[in-house]
Structure formats: structure tokens, C-alpha cells
Amino acid sequence: MQQPGSTYGQSSGQQQPYQQQQQPYQQQQQPYQQQQQPYQQQQPYQQQPPHFQQSQQADRYPPSPPLHMHGNQQQQYGPQGSSAAYPPTPPTAGYPAMQQPRQQHQQTYSAYPEYNPQSNVVGGRSYQGSVSGLSGWNDPPKQTADADAAEHILKVAGAAPEGVIVASFTAAMDLARSILDRMPNQRQKVEDTDRRIDGLFDRLANHKIQSQRMVFAQLFQVAQALNSKSYMEAQAMILKMMTSNYADETQWILGAKRLVELLMLLG
């Protein structure tokens, strides 16, 4: 029995509402657990088939511009994976591969025609036609001054300049052979020079040089320089002959050059 004024019954009677308040709290947790179920149901979204993922990736990138194919056909190729920055090579599909158009040959105009050395050769003699109305400015330079100088030299030389040339080169060759006493290593050069000078004498004997008046006059000047032992003057004249167009005289001209070199070694 409860005593009047005792709070035991009251305190025990107040615990029932406290237990009833906990039930709604437990009921509130059930909807929270139910809310987690839809979140777990989203896992199958990650396991979707590959074609579904590719369709989403294709929506992220704009399609590449159409590529011109053979004829009027066109085909688009969208980006695939990491190769989206580079357009893929379209298949030929039985058509021949596209080729870049070749550059057309552009004809250039020149005021001066291309030089052809055989175009101006007539009868074994080269000529260059003059332009009408231009006072012959395109004519080849005339070598009248050198020809006149050569004739003057040969006129001063007398009736037989060949004798002067042969005597001068013979004396110079005899002097060059004496170098073998001091320089025996020059024997091959001396023998080659002697053979080339003999070739000069043969051409003089057969009158192969006399008809070439300029060559004949320059050869006479070399002979005069050898007589006076002016080797520098003789060497300068020989170098001038080597730079001229004397194709038939190259053998003995080279011999004359070596002869002067041997004489300069003697001093």
C-alpha cells in the first residue's frame, strides 16, 4: 500500500510516458534505413553495358566535321576514347586512296633566253646575232687590239721567229738539267719537262703554231724573257696563256711552266 504523501508511486507512474516517447524515436529510424535502400539500388547504374557508356561519352564531345570521300560520299567519325584529338583515318571501302593534287608546272617568263652553246654554232664557228635597232650592242667584243699587238711583235722579231724560240728554249732546258746535280729528286720533273718541250719543237716544225698569230707572238715573248732570265715575266706570260682557250697547246704550255719553275729553283 502506498502511504499518503509518498512519491514512490508517482515516480514509478511517470516512467511509462518516458518509454512511450522512445517508441516514436525508433519509428523515426526506420524511414532513415528505408532511405538507404534506394541509394544502394543505384549500384547497378555503374554496371551498365559498354554501349551505354560510349553513348554518354559521345554526347560530351562534338562530332568531327565530315571528311570528303571519293565522289560525293561523306562519312563522319566521332571521337573514340583518347584518340578524340586526332581524326581517325577513314577506310577506303574499296575506293582508291586520296592523293594530293600535283603542283602544276608554272612556266616562268624570262627576258633573256637560256643559253645553248650549240645553238649559235654554224660551220664550226660560233657567232651571236645582233639585235636590230640597238646599234650592235649585243655583238661579241672584237680582239682587234690584241691581234694588232701580236702582228707588231712578230714583225719586230724578224723573218724567222721560230729560230729564236727554239734556241731560247734549248738553252733554258740545258740549264734546267743541271739542277739534278744538287736536287736528284727532281729527275722525274726534268724528264717530263724535256718531253713536253720536244712536243713544242715538233709543232713548230710542222707549222702548227705559226698560223695562230696570238699564240705565236706570246711564245716569242716567253722566249725573250728566258734569254734575259726574266723568269717572273716569263711565268706571268705563261699563266696568261694557260687561262686562254688554247686547247691544242696545253701540253707544251705546261712544259714551259715547269721549265720556268726549275730555273727559279736554280736562282
Image (cartoon, rainbow, N blue to C red):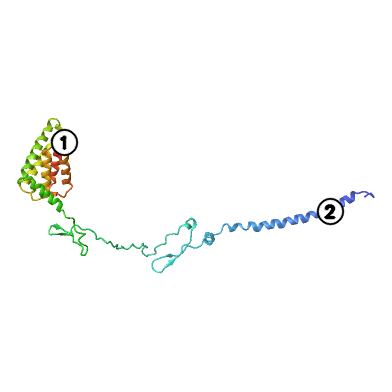
Q: Which residue is mark 1?
A: 264
Q: Residue at x 75, y 54 (%)?
A: 26
- Image quadrant assignment for residue 160: top left
Residue nearest the viewer, comparing 159 with 234 = 159
x and y percentages locating residue 224 in the rendered image: 11, 41
Q: Element type at marker 2?
A: helix
Residue at the outermost right position:
4
Q: Residue at x 89, y 51 (%)?
A: 10
x and y percentages locating residue 56 in the rendered image: 54, 61
x and y percentages locating residue 234 in the rendered image: 15, 41
Q: Which mark is residue 16?
A: 2
At label 2, counting other C-alpha atoms closer than 10 Å, the crowd grade (few under 14, some 14-19, many 20 or more) is few
Q: Element type at marker 1?
A: helix
As shown in the figure, which amino acid type bears the numbered disc 1?
Met
Residue at the outermost bottom position:
72
As shown in the figure, which amino acid type bears the numbered disc 2?
Gln
Query: Is residue 260 placed above or below 70 in the rendered structure?
Result: above
**Which mark is nearer the camera, 2 or 1?**
1
Image quarter of the C terminus: top left
Q: Tell whether 34 sits left or right of 162.
A: right
- Image quadrant assignment for residue 127: bottom left
Q: CA distance from mark 2 to mark 1?
A: 144 Å
Residue nearest the viewer, comparing 153 with 85 = 153
Sooner in the amino-acid sequence: mark 2 or mark 1: 2
Residue at the outermost top position:
182
Q: Which mark is residue 31?
A: none
Q: Tell whether 114 sits left or right of 156.
A: right
Residue nearest the viewer, comparing 227 with 96 = 227
- Image quadrant assignment for residue 23: bottom right
Query: Is residue 142 placed above or below 232 in the rendered structure?
Result: below
